Amino acid sequence: MSTTLIEIRRAKPADAVAVATAHDAAWKTSYRGIIPGPELEKLINRRGPAWWENAIAKGSRVALLGFGDRIAGYANYGRNRARSLSYDGEIYELYLCPEFQGLGFGRRLFSAARRDLAQSGLKSLVVWALSDNEPAVEFYRALGGRAVARSSERFGQKSLDKVAFGWQA
């Protein structure tokens, strides 16, 4: 019987290629048919390995979920960027490669990011999701997130609704 190690750890600059690979796969799956094609490709292409290496080297909090020798997904998080919302922390991104979705790994990654934020004194938390991304909306609801704000974001000529989910300490 073989065992596969599942671990969550902080990203290092050397992980940049693996994070970029997970980002690309997750975004293509999550946003195809929601974000217009050319805009989606631009968003994916601007986050290549060099971008991730630089972000990680500068101290961005990026947690990786490793499954054996593969990076299955990541979470990027820190202080809440929306001053109008009274939450301390924010998960900016939480993505899994498509083949790892629906297996409970997202919940583990979310919990690890939330715990890390709380240990830094950021006890309440907000996450934004595009309203049309039904799997993400359902995921955050299932984790106990409460819809606390709405906004929109432009992607080329298309404006998409987004919702903020909040968790108090």
Image (tube, grey):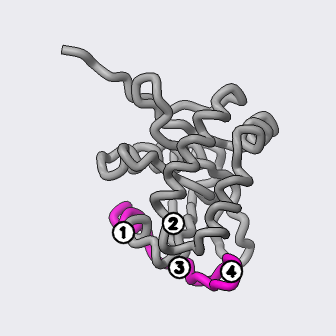
Mark 4: secondary structure: strand
Q: Quadrant of residue 61?
A: top right
Q: Earlier in the sequence, mark 4 or mark 3?
A: 3
Residue occupied by mark 1? 138
Disc 4 vs disc 3: which is toward the camera?
4
The numbered disc on residue 148 is 3
**Residues at marks 2 and 4, CA–CA distance in whole angstroms:** 14 Å
**Quick one: label 1, few (<14), some, or many (20+) residues within 10 Å?**
few
Whether the residues at callouts 4 and 3 have beta carbons within 8 Å, the answer is no
Mark 3: secondary structure: strand
Estimate the x, y position of residue 54 in percent, counting from the top left.
80, 39
Q: Which residue does the image show at 70% across and 56% down from the upper left?
A: 79
Mark 1: secondary structure: helix
Give the amino acid type for the residue marked by disc 4 in the picture: Arg
Question: Which region of the structure is painted magenta?
Answer: 138-162
Q: Is residue 144 visible?
A: no
Q: Earlier in the sequence, mark 3 or mark 1?
A: 1
Whether the residues at callouts 3 and 2 have beta carbons within 8 Å, the answer is no
Q: Which residue does the image show at 41% across and 30% down from the upper left?
A: 67
Q: Quadrant of the N terminus?
A: top left
Disc 3 vs disc 2: which is toward the camera?
2
Whether the residues at callouts 2 and 1 have beta carbons within 8 Å, the answer is no
Give the amino acid type for the residue marked by disc 1 in the picture: Glu
Residue occupied by mark 4? 154
Q: Quadrant of residue 91?
A: bottom right
Q: Earlier in the sequence, mark 3 or mark 2?
A: 2
Q: Main secondary structure of the magenta part?
A: strand
Residue occupied by mark 2? 31
